[in-house]
Amino acid sequence: MRSLLTTVRDRGRSWWGARTESQRDLWRIGAIVLLLVAAGAAAYRYGRPVLHRWQRDQALAEARELAAKKDYRAALVALHRAVAKSPSEVQTWKQVADFLGELGSPEVLVARKNLVWLAPDDLSLRLGFVLDALRFGDVAGAREAVAGVRDAAREEVDFYRMAAALAYATGRTEEFERSLTELLARAPADREAALDLATLRLWGADPARAEAARTALTELLAHPEVRVRAAVELLKHTARTGTRPEASALVAGLHRRWFGRPPPPLAETAQRAVTEPPGWVPVVEAMKRDAAESAHEAAVLARWLAAIGQPREAALWLDGLAERVRRSRLVGAARLELALGLDDAERLRPLLLDGAWGRARSDTVDLAFAARWQRRAGRTANAAATWADAVATAGES
């Protein structure tokens, strides 16, 4: 019995052989047209997303260039063009949110909120919104985002990160401690949470818990990512509550941690002339060296140096950090605080132009400094008018 395939093939050949050459040409043209239509549909279906991603990336690159030139209005237009190409794509909104966050723009909350709307069950995206909402003072928005987590996800680590951040921002100490405890029960290797919990308990009223926290902070010295901040908390607490022998013992322990040996003893005459414990200077220098690679560590260390009477030294040290760290949001805020504390206008102006307090036009900054000069010169009326002009230009940016 002949197979069905053979029968169909033979009939096809017979049918094709009965056609004239003109008819065969028409069929060939029809087949080519169908192939082209199919290829065009496939290209449209699969090529369109690629094209949109390329256009999105071009718009984002343009926005970065415009922001670097301080043309923030045009930068926002470029961002709108980027999301218009892929309004429902999570990756697009993530890139936009990251850019706006780096820029220090409150519009980041719009991007973060869209991410939560597009992927409501992604707790990492919801956490990003909560942190930025708290950063820009939208406590109600952060609280709503935390409350919107479905019950099944309330045992996940990121939920407790959200809850802890909200509790800290609103001054609810007990809830902050409870959230950190739950977080560490699920992620015991989270050094940041361990540092926060130990710091909270160190400054608490319970002596036993404070001693346990001191031990925990001492153990955290073994971890480079939190070492400097743990050392700063120990030094602050000992300076506030300890004795000189306790301070010397702590510095000696820190010296052993960084250098593997105790500090050399001071001669008796030197002890009378020097107020710091033995090993103090090399320990502080080692802390600076370690903190130089981390924005968080550097910002904390600089504020502590200012608190112990070295604000100008701290500002100069931050000025010399690598650009990646120096231009970070955390270090930028610390540099701004130091410049304000030192009343250093020459240092403050470039920080403002660089976005330490969010985006600012150069004419806004110039007018603000002019108002400051006029006020100091006793020209109060002129200062008020110039300040009003500065506020008006800020609203136009």
Image (cartoon, helix red, strand yellow):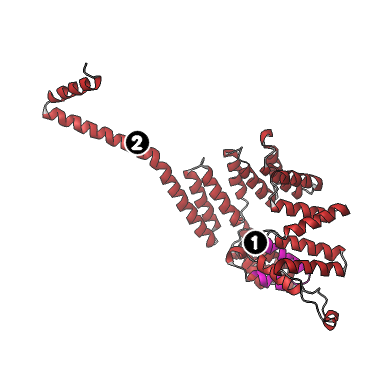
Bin the neighbour count of mark 2 within 10 Å (Cα to Cα): few under 14, some 14-19, many 20 and up.
few
What residue would you read off at disc 2? 41
The image quarter in which residue 298 lies = bottom right
Residue 75 percent across, percent down from the top left:
52, 55
Q: Is residue 322 left or right of residue 218?
A: left
Bin the neighbour count of mark 1 within 10 Å (Cα to Cα): few under 14, some 14-19, many 20 and up.
many
Residue 73 percent across, percent down from the top left:
54, 55
Q: Is residue 205 visible?
A: no
Q: Is residue 320 visible?
A: yes
Instruction: Measure the C-alpha gap from mark 1 to mark 2.
Output: 50 Å
What residue would you read off at disc 1? 295
Give the answer, above or below, for where 157 lies relative to 390.
above
Quadrant including the N terminus? top left
Residue 267 percent across, percent down from the top left:
82, 81
Q: Secondary structure at mark 2?
A: helix
Quadrant including the C terminus? bottom right
Closest to the observer, 283 or 32: 283
**Which stretch appears magenta?**
296-318
**What amino acid is found at the position of numbered circle 2 in the picture?**
Ala
Mark 1 or mark 2, which is nearer to you? 1
Q: Secondary structure at mark 1?
A: helix
Q: Is residue 41 left or right of residue 339?
A: left
Mark before the other along the chain sequence, 1 or 2: 2
What is the count of numbered marks? 2
